[in-house]
Image (cartoon, helix red, strand yellow):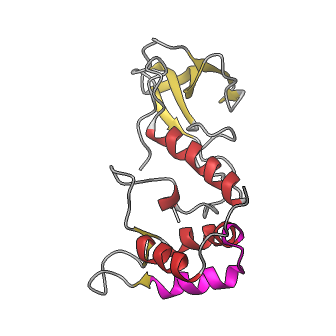
Amino acid sequence: MDTLPTPGDPGSGRPSLLSQVCARSLAVGQLEHVDGARPYCTPDGAGAVLGVFRAEGLTGAVTRVVSLDQACPAKPFLSSYRGVRVTCAEPGQDYSRALVVPVRGDAPADPAVPPDAVTASASGLDPQISPAYARLQAPRVARARGLPSAVVLALIRQYTTGRALGVLGGPGVNVLELNLALDRSHPYPAKES
């Protein structure tokens, strides 16, 4: 078992936190055979964030629009915004005067890929995952171990804990204990040489 961020700096080569979340959601969706679409993400896994320039700074007519998380030569996720053509972000350009406008898009409000599947602790080694994320992985784990999904789902229920102190956070699945239980009861099939 394994807030809207500031857009990335197209010149830095580092994606924004939102783009990292969007890309991870697509990757998890592909791995688990579900739709990896998320609100505020482009279909190709970048943050759906525009930099909108207006004639009088914060007000006035829209004069220029840049897709902040899509560096050139990328094709922007929208062709136009409020009648103005959207362009890709040019590396090294200063977009600090633009109004940042996130675009929700048509992704479901409740994505198939749970939030903890696209975020991680600083170490990336989280002792628990949400039951939703564990259930999402169950078919793949069952296939890899050559057993019915129902067996994996039963173990997930067995290793799901309640809220801390009965009120804090949400239920969690202890990944280490679950994996140890799977190894004891249903080890991976031996590979042929």
Q: Residue furthest front?
A: 193
Q: Position of residue 2 (x, y in %)?
A: 51, 61
The quarter holding residue 129 reads bottom left
Q: Residue furthest left?
A: 165
Q: Is residue 165 above or below residue 131?
A: below
Camera-side residue of 101 and 74: 74
Q: Is residue 113 above or below residue 154?
A: above
Q: Position of residue 76 (x, y in %)?
A: 67, 26
Q: From the viewer's perspective, is 91 left or right of 103?
A: left
Camera-side residue of 25 and 5: 25
Camera-side residue of 155 and 188: 188
Q: Is residue 156 magenta?
A: yes
- Visible residue check, residue 12: yes
Residue at image point 67% right, 73% down? 142
Q: From the viewer's perspective, is 65 left or right of 121?
A: right
The prevailing secondary structure element of the residues shown in magenta is helix
The quarter holding residue 44 reads top right
Q: Is residue 160 above or below residue 56?
A: below
Residue at image point 49% right, 73% down? 179
Q: From the viewer's perspective, is 60 left or right of 77?
A: left
Residue at image point 72% right, 27% down? 79
Q: Is residue 108 magenta?
A: no
Q: Position of residue 40 (x, y in %)?
A: 57, 45
The count of marks equals: 0
Camera-side residue of 66 and 46: 46
- Visible residue check, residue 107: no
Q: Position of residue 175 (x, y in %)?
A: 45, 71
Residue at image point 66% right, 51% down? 37
- Magenta residues span 143-159
Q: Is residue 42 above or below residue 72?
A: below
The image quadrant where one finds the C terminus is bottom right
